[in-house]
Each structure stands twice: as C-alpha cells, then as structure tokens.
Image (cartoon, helix red, strand yellow):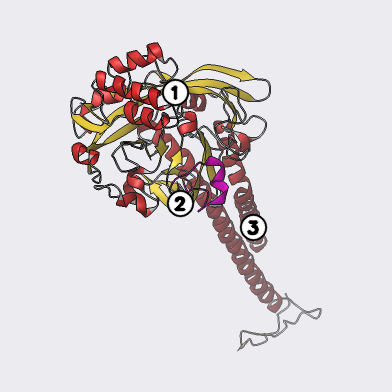
Amino acid sequence: HTAAMAGTGAKAAVGFLVAGVLAVVFGTVLTFVGPIIIDDQIVKNTVIDPNNDMSYTMWKDIPVPFYMSVYFFNVLNPKEILTGEKPMVEQRGPYVYRKRCQKDNITFHPNDTVSYREYRQYYFEPSMSAGNESDVVTIPNMLVLGAAVMMETLPYAFRLMISATFKTFNEGPFLTKTVEELMWGYDSKLVDFLNKYLPGMLPSSGKFGLFAEFNNSNTGLFTIFTGQDDIRKVHKVDSWNGLTELSYWRTPQANMINGTAGQMWPPFMTKESTLPFYSPDACRSLELVYQRPGEFKGVPLYRYVAPKTMFANGIDYPPNEGFCPCRKSGLLNVSSCRHNSPVFISHPHFFNADLSLLDTVLGLNPNEDEHGLFIDIHPVSFVCSRPCSETGKISEVVMPMIWFEERGNIDGPVLTTFHTNLVVLPTVMEYMQYGFIALGLVTVVIAVLVHRRLKVHLNKSHLTSSSQSPDPEGKLVSSALGGQSFSVHRAKKI
C-alpha cells in the first residue's frame, strides 16, 4: 500500500514539475514571440495591397471624417488703413466644411510603388459653424494688391493703365463679399478683362475664389511606396507629378520631396522619429517633431508638432536660406509657386513668428493650443495663414487674411478596430506571457513540495518498518524512534 502511494505521489510530482516547466518555457517564449507576431500583423495591415481588403479600403477611401474650419480676418477699419493707420481685424468663424477624400487613377508599378490622384470635395456644415456662408466679411483684395506689388518694376505708363483699369471696374484695395463668394468664387468683370487681355496672369480662368481650386480637385499625381519590399518606406513619396524634386526654391535641399503625402507614416515610430511630409499647398516638404505622449479614447498617441524653425527666415535659421527671399521669421514666401503674387504662409495669428509682426496688426492673439500645427499619431491639421502685402499710401504690412485647419478623429468601428488590435490584443498577450510564467513557477513549487512531502513520508515508513524487522536469531531489535523506547519481548515459538 505504501509503495502504491509512493508511486502515485511521484507521478504527481513529476507531472506538476513537467507542467510547470512547460508553462514557464511557453511564457518566456511568448515574451519574445508575442511582439513579433503583433509586429508582423501590423506590417501586413500597413502594406498597400489590394488583397488586404480592410487596410486597402481604408487607404483608398479614408473612413475618418475630416473637417476643414475656415476663419476670416475681417478688416474693421479699411478707410483708416488707407491713411496709414494700423490694420484692425477681428476673427470671424469657424465656417466648417466636411471634407471627403477619395483616391482614383490607382496604378501599381513593378518597383513596389503605386500612383494615384486624391480628389477632395467640401460640404458646408451649418450645425458646426459659427455663422452662415451668407455672412459678409471684408478682406484685402488679392487681385488689386497682388497686381500692385507685381507691377512695381514695370514702366510707369503701364502701371498707370492698370490703375485706371482697376478704377474702371470699381476695384479697391479691400473686398467685401459673402463667405461663399470668397470661398468658392464670384463673377468679376476685372477677372474676365485680365483673362482676355493678359492671359496667364491669374491662376484660373473661371470664378475667382480663395478655395476655388480646392473643391472637386486633386492634389496632383502622387507616386508612393507600397512597403512590399521594405515596410520602412511605406507611404513615402517617390515622385509628385512625375517630379522627384521641385524647382520653386533656391537650393537642392529646399527642393527635395521628403516624407509621405501627409496622411500616413511607416509604423514603429519612436520619440526620436520625425514626421516628414510633402505639402502641395505649401509647395515644399515639412517636418514635425515629437513633443509629448497622449491618449485618445483609450488609444495611446504621440504628439508631433511643428518646430519653431519651420517658417524661420534664413538669418535666424540658415538651413532655410533656400526658401528665401525671406521676410521676418514666421513667414514662408510662396510667391514662386503662386504666379509670383505676394502670398505668404504662416501659423495662424503669427504664432511662432517674429513679435514685430504682431505689432503691425491689431486683433491677433496667438496661442499654441489653437494655432499650433500638430499631428497625434499612434507609436491633423495643417494650420496656416495666407497673408499678403499692400502698397500705395498704406504702410507696408503683412496682413493676415484667412486661416484654416483640418481635423480628423478616428471614431466608430474604425476606432474599435484600432483599439482592439493596438491596445487590447497586446495587453492580453502581455498578461498571458506573465501569467504563464507565474503559473509555471507556482506549479514547479507545488511539484517540489509534493516531492519533499513524499520523501518525508517514505522515510517515516522505512524507519517504522525497520523497527519491527526480526533478527536472525528470532529476536526483535529494540529501537528508539522519535525519542520513545520500545520494550523487547521474546517471541514464543510454536
């Protein structure tokens, strides 16, 4: 009976030991294999591949709702400005438009790249806006002021003729129109005249509007890497409109097309990573840098922001010399890609710009939360102001006219998918690996305790059996067990 119990106990101890060791080994292996499995799934879901229905559909037709909020700097004292007083503006808006993006003309190439055109459409959202498109605002007249600056080097007689033309069509240095007209275009006899007698002077031949070229248009022919050969290159731009470099700027570095198209980046970003992207609207490549961690509805994020040097001039930041001729820091001169019109890009309200720019215009209040350019991305908004210069009796000043931002937040089923794949599954995997290791260690301890208890039990059984064993002469051997004495009796022979 004792032998049977010993055998059963030994088998139990061995079983516990084997199970515990296997659990520890499995948990340890999982700590190494688990992240590899997750990373492999991320790579498969990041590669641009028509065979991957979910990720390809999300890339082709972005399911995240994007909204463009437009703010106008309504000029309060246009007549006084003409006499040399400081411009006084008030911000009007936001006027919010839902943006729909859809990629078309998609063509895959043998070198693991894909070409496409992304078309964009805008729909006014009254419920999200602080006004209606029928609101009337006064802003600088880009046609008049732009033409005045561009004609400064022309002969006096020609300038006089153009000035007379402006007066004939009742065009002055300021323009008062509805938001809808300023956004999407309005009929102008001056525009018709210029297109007829000075073709090519204006960027378009239709209605003149600040966003007339945006709606129902595309951002150019992008060719990007699919990531099939190297996931580190996925979404990076190979060429734009067939160009691998630009011709707007003064140096090869400034003309480089770097980064992605500005919607997605390669996976596995770190705090040391930067987010470079090419912006056709800014006519150059831009780069964001890591600022701080964050969270959005349970999904951990990294916030990348525009560095203060993004729009610095060549004096304050020598690498930006290629983007000159420059003005004060905080202004990007995009005249070279805007038909030589005096147009600049900055952060809204001259955020991160030379403080002297704020002294020339009343009514500006820059702050980082509202006017900083940032992207929250797992481990959008392009915010800019489009000012212009003025001439004549008006003091030379960079006048903010309009700024807009684009925002898109993951929500609904897309957010659920992201949260499951990027938060829940890695957390479950982590708990599993440590759970198996802990369970295995506990099981090994149980096996050791069972083995030790069995050993003690066998020792007791052996000693008890030895105390009752007859000697060769038929005598019982006396023994002391546990400090107790047993008397010796002679066995009676039968």
Q: Which residue is mark 1?
A: 61
Given residues 87 and 442, the one toward you in this image is: 87
In the drawing, what numbered circle is on residue 17? 3
Question: How far across and how far down the image is residue 419, in percent?
Answer: 43, 40
In-front residue for pair 444/396: 396
Q: CA distance from mark 3 to mark 2?
A: 61 Å
Q: Position of residue 46 (x, y in %)?
A: 55, 33
Q: In this picture, is 475 found above or below 153? A: below
Q: Which mark is residue 346?
A: none
- Give the quarter of the image for residue 106: top right
As shown in the figure, which amino acid type bears the numbered disc 1?
A: Asp
Q: Which residues are magenta?
A: 312-327
The residue located at (43%, 20%) in the rendering is 201
- Amino acid carrying label 2: it is Lys
Q: Nearer the viewer, mark 3 or mark 1?
A: 1
> Of label 3 and label 2, which has the lower sequence position?
3
Report the side of 213 relative to 173 (left or right): right
314 in the magenta segment: yes
Q: Looking at the image, is mark 2 or mark 1 earlier in the sequence?
A: 1
Q: How dense is the environment of label 3, judged by Cα within 10 Å: few (below 14), some, or many (20 and up)? A: many
- Distance, label 2 to label 1, CA atoms, is 33 Å
Secondary structure category for the residue under label 3:
helix
**Total count of labels:** 3
Q: Which residue position holds label 2? A: 308
